[in-house]
Image: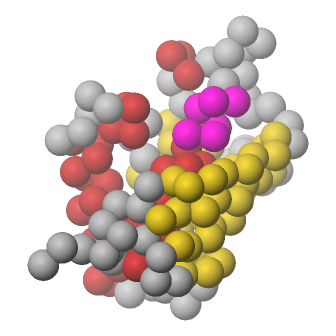
Amino acid sequence: MSTDTRTWLEQELRFINGEMAHTLNGRLKAALVSCDDGNQEITLSFPLEDWQVNGLGTLHGGMVNTMMDLAMSMAVYCFSRQTIPPTVSMTTNYLRPVPMEKAVEIRARVTSLGRRNATAYCEAVIPKNGKLAATAVGTYAVIPKQS
Protein backbone atom coordinates (compact mmCIF):
# COMPACT_ATOMS: atom_id res chain seq x y z
CA MET A 1 0.00 0.00 0.00
CA SER A 2 1.20 3.44 -0.85
CA THR A 3 1.96 5.68 2.12
CA ASP A 4 0.42 8.53 0.12
CA THR A 5 -2.86 6.61 -0.27
CA ARG A 6 -2.98 5.67 3.43
CA THR A 7 -2.23 9.26 4.49
CA TRP A 8 -4.85 10.63 2.09
CA LEU A 9 -7.54 8.19 3.29
CA GLU A 10 -6.78 8.82 6.96
CA GLN A 11 -7.00 12.58 6.36
CA GLU A 12 -10.37 12.22 4.59
CA LEU A 13 -11.73 10.00 7.38
CA ARG A 14 -10.53 12.50 10.03
CA PHE A 15 -12.49 15.20 8.16
CA ILE A 16 -15.64 13.03 7.98
CA ASN A 17 -15.40 11.95 11.62
CA GLY A 18 -14.50 15.46 12.82
CA GLU A 19 -15.87 18.31 10.71
CA MET A 20 -18.83 16.18 9.58
CA ALA A 21 -19.47 14.44 12.93
CA HIS A 22 -23.05 15.75 12.94
CA THR A 23 -23.87 13.88 9.67
CA LEU A 24 -24.77 10.20 9.35
CA ASN A 25 -21.42 9.40 7.73
CA GLY A 26 -19.63 11.22 10.55
CA ARG A 27 -21.63 9.39 13.22
CA LEU A 28 -20.46 6.05 11.76
CA LYS A 29 -16.85 6.78 12.85
CA ALA A 30 -15.18 4.75 10.08
CA ALA A 31 -11.54 3.85 10.59
CA LEU A 32 -9.08 2.68 7.97
CA VAL A 33 -7.95 -0.93 8.39
CA SER A 34 -6.09 -1.35 5.10
CA CYS A 35 -5.83 -0.21 1.51
CA ASP A 36 -4.36 -1.88 -1.54
CA ASP A 37 -3.50 0.40 -4.46
CA GLY A 38 -2.91 -2.49 -6.87
CA ASN A 39 -6.36 -4.00 -6.32
CA GLN A 40 -8.04 -0.62 -5.72
CA GLU A 41 -9.41 -1.96 -2.43
CA ILE A 42 -9.92 -0.47 1.01
CA THR A 43 -11.16 -1.97 4.27
CA LEU A 44 -12.91 0.18 6.84
CA SER A 45 -13.94 -0.73 10.37
CA PHE A 46 -17.14 0.66 11.84
CA PRO A 47 -17.70 0.55 15.61
CA LEU A 48 -21.15 -0.70 16.55
CA GLU A 49 -23.23 1.47 18.87
CA ASP A 50 -26.63 1.14 20.55
CA TRP A 51 -28.34 3.65 18.22
CA GLN A 52 -27.63 1.32 15.24
CA VAL A 53 -29.51 -1.71 16.60
CA ASN A 54 -32.73 -3.09 15.14
CA GLY A 55 -35.70 -4.62 16.99
CA LEU A 56 -34.03 -8.05 16.92
CA GLY A 57 -30.91 -6.87 18.73
CA THR A 58 -28.63 -7.00 15.68
CA LEU A 59 -27.19 -4.28 13.45
CA HIS A 60 -29.98 -2.58 11.50
CA GLY A 61 -29.89 -3.49 7.79
CA GLY A 62 -30.05 0.18 6.84
CA MET A 63 -26.87 0.77 8.84
CA VAL A 64 -25.11 -2.12 7.06
CA ASN A 65 -26.19 -0.66 3.73
CA THR A 66 -25.05 2.85 4.69
CA MET A 67 -21.65 1.56 5.84
CA MET A 68 -21.19 -0.36 2.58
CA ASP A 69 -22.24 2.68 0.54
CA LEU A 70 -19.74 4.86 2.40
CA ALA A 71 -16.93 2.31 1.93
CA MET A 72 -17.57 1.90 -1.82
CA SER A 73 -17.90 5.64 -2.32
CA MET A 74 -14.63 6.22 -0.41
CA ALA A 75 -12.89 3.60 -2.57
CA VAL A 76 -14.07 5.31 -5.77
CA TYR A 77 -13.15 8.72 -4.33
CA CYS A 78 -9.71 7.46 -3.31
CA PHE A 79 -8.76 5.83 -6.58
CA SER A 80 -10.32 8.42 -8.91
CA ARG A 81 -9.12 11.44 -6.87
CA GLN A 82 -11.99 13.44 -8.32
CA THR A 83 -14.92 14.82 -6.29
CA ILE A 84 -16.90 12.78 -3.76
CA PRO A 85 -18.90 10.44 -6.00
CA PRO A 86 -22.68 10.36 -5.60
CA THR A 87 -24.35 6.95 -5.61
CA VAL A 88 -26.19 6.14 -8.84
CA SER A 89 -27.42 2.68 -7.85
CA MET A 90 -26.71 0.03 -5.26
CA THR A 91 -27.82 -3.56 -4.78
CA THR A 92 -27.35 -5.27 -1.43
CA ASN A 93 -27.63 -8.93 -0.49
CA TYR A 94 -28.06 -9.66 3.21
CA LEU A 95 -26.60 -13.06 4.14
CA ARG A 96 -26.72 -13.15 7.95
CA PRO A 97 -27.31 -10.75 10.83
CA VAL A 98 -24.45 -8.73 12.28
CA PRO A 99 -24.28 -9.24 16.06
CA MET A 100 -23.93 -6.07 18.11
CA GLU A 101 -20.35 -6.71 19.09
CA LYS A 102 -17.36 -4.38 18.84
CA ALA A 103 -17.30 -3.57 15.09
CA VAL A 104 -18.02 -4.67 11.55
CA GLU A 105 -15.50 -4.48 8.72
CA ILE A 106 -16.36 -3.47 5.17
CA ARG A 107 -14.04 -4.38 2.28
CA ALA A 108 -14.70 -2.31 -0.84
CA ARG A 109 -13.02 -2.75 -4.22
CA VAL A 110 -13.35 -0.60 -7.33
CA THR A 111 -14.10 -3.01 -10.17
CA SER A 112 -14.28 -0.46 -12.98
CA LEU A 113 -13.31 3.18 -13.12
CA GLY A 114 -14.38 5.16 -16.16
CA ARG A 115 -14.53 8.84 -16.97
CA ARG A 116 -18.20 9.17 -15.98
CA ASN A 117 -19.04 6.13 -13.84
CA ALA A 118 -17.34 3.69 -11.52
CA THR A 119 -18.49 0.35 -10.16
CA ALA A 120 -17.52 -1.09 -6.81
CA TYR A 121 -18.12 -4.33 -4.94
CA CYS A 122 -18.03 -4.76 -1.18
CA GLU A 123 -18.43 -7.27 1.61
CA ALA A 124 -19.51 -6.74 5.21
CA VAL A 125 -17.46 -9.11 7.37
CA ILE A 126 -18.13 -10.08 10.97
CA PRO A 127 -14.64 -9.76 12.52
CA LYS A 128 -15.20 -12.32 15.27
CA ASN A 129 -15.73 -15.24 12.85
CA GLY A 130 -14.75 -13.86 9.43
CA LYS A 131 -18.17 -14.69 7.96
CA LEU A 132 -19.83 -12.53 5.34
CA ALA A 133 -22.90 -10.69 6.58
CA ALA A 134 -23.74 -8.87 3.33
CA THR A 135 -22.44 -8.08 -0.13
CA ALA A 136 -23.20 -5.14 -2.38
CA VAL A 137 -22.48 -3.71 -5.81
CA GLY A 138 -22.72 0.01 -6.43
CA THR A 139 -22.41 2.40 -9.34
CA TYR A 140 -21.07 5.89 -8.63
CA ALA A 141 -20.89 9.04 -10.76
CA VAL A 142 -17.34 10.24 -11.38
CA ILE A 143 -17.44 14.02 -11.39
CA PRO A 144 -14.18 15.78 -12.29
CA LYS A 145 -12.78 18.34 -9.85
CA GLN A 146 -13.33 21.92 -10.86
CA SER A 147 -10.05 23.77 -11.36
Is 36 rendered above or below residue 15? below
Is 93 rendered above or below residue 88? above
Residue 36 shows up from this direction: no
Position in image of residue 105 (x %, y %):
61, 51
Residue nearest the observer in this picture, 123 or 73: 73
Position in image of residue 132 (x %, y %):
80, 51
Residue nearest the observer in this picture, 104 or 112: 112
Position in image of residue 104 (x %, y %):
62, 43
Count of numbered circles on the image: 0
Left or right of 120 on screen, residue 93: right
Residue 5 shows up from this direction: yes
The residue most toward the top is: 55
Q: Quadrant of the N terminus?
A: bottom left
Residue nearest the observer in this picture, 53 or 120: 120
Left or right of 115 on screen, residue 27: left
Is 129 rendered above or below residue 47? below
Position in image of residue 35 (x %, y %):
49, 74
The residue most toward the right is: 95
Residue nearest the observer in this picture, 110 or 106: 110
Left or right of 74 on screen, residue 83: left
Identify the residue shown where x is 52% and y is 83%. Answer: 114
Identify the residue shown where x is 70% and y is 59%. Answer: 137
Q: Main secondary structure of the magenta part?
A: helix
Q: Which portion, as a residue range, is magenta?
A: 61-66
The residue most toward the left is: 147
89 inside magenta stretch: no
Identify the residue shown where x is 55% and y is 40%. Answer: 66
Identify the residue shown where x is 62% and y is 68%. Answer: 120
Q: Quadrant of the C terminus?
A: bottom left
